[in-house]
Amino acid sequence: MKTSHRVQSTELGQAIRAQNGTYYRVWAISLLAGLLALTPTLYMLQVYDRVVNSRSLVTLQMLLLLVLGIYVVMEVLHWARAEMIRQAAEQVDADLNERLFDAVFMAHLHKLKVNGNQIFADLRTLREFFVSPVVFAVLESPITPCWAHWSSWC
């Protein structure tokens, strides 16, 4: 006889999984921003290879403009990533907020001892966790081996 081990899906899990598309886009943006973070190393390599040898001020100016443009793109990517994560966290909060309110209300109607303030504080903590620097560091962690490998080349 075959037994199936089906995992019960919780409402929290469903609310988080509903945002999977956003999480994949945020991860892709983080990967691209992480690759652009190699800009200072590449800039210095180009300065030593091209500018020092040729003493060309125009080359240095063009490299500087390129790097400044890349920094602007990186900041826009970081801003977009933060906004996407914030909106996903707020959507998870909105998906769960009404259900939690109803559950707390019903518990109070049945005279059960429930700390509604703590429940909503926990939901707020979850929402704030999604936009914390820890999450952004985890999102950027896949590119870290590339940085380590790249710096060993230089």
Image (tube, rainbow, N blue to C red):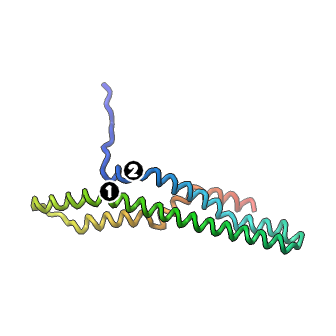
| Closer-to-camera residue (63/145) | 63
The residue sitting at 62% across, 56% down in the picture is 145
Most foreground residue, 51 or 70:
70
**How far across and how far down the image is residue 128, in percent?**
39, 67
Q: Which residue is mark 1?
A: 95
For label 2, the SS is loop
Q: Amino acid at mark 1?
A: Asp
Viewport quadrant of the C terminus: bottom right
* Residue 7 percent location from the top left of the image: 33, 42
x and y percentages locating residue 121 in the rendered image: 29, 68
Q: In percent of the image, x 79 and y 66: which residue is there?
A: 46
Which of disc 2 and disc 1 is earlier in sequence? 2
Look at the numbered discs 1 and 2 and tell me whether their residues touch, using CB distance below 8 Å. yes
**In screen coordinates, is 69 left or right of 22?**
right
Residue 48 left/right relative to 86: right
Image location (x, y in percent) of residue 132: 45, 67
Identify the residue under disc 2: 18
Q: Quadrant of the N terminus?
A: top left
Give the residue type that dot 2 points to.
Ala
Q: For residue 150, what is the image quadrant?
A: bottom right
Q: Is residue 79 left or right of residue 17?
A: right
Q: Secondary structure at mark 1?
A: helix
Residue at 73% x, 67% y: name it: 66
Q: Name the image quarter holding residue 73.
A: bottom right
Query: Crowdedness of circle 2 by 10 Å Cα count: few (<14), some, many (20+)?
Result: some
Identify which residue is drawn at 64% across, 59% down: 35
The one of 143 and 145 positioned closer to us in this rendering: 143
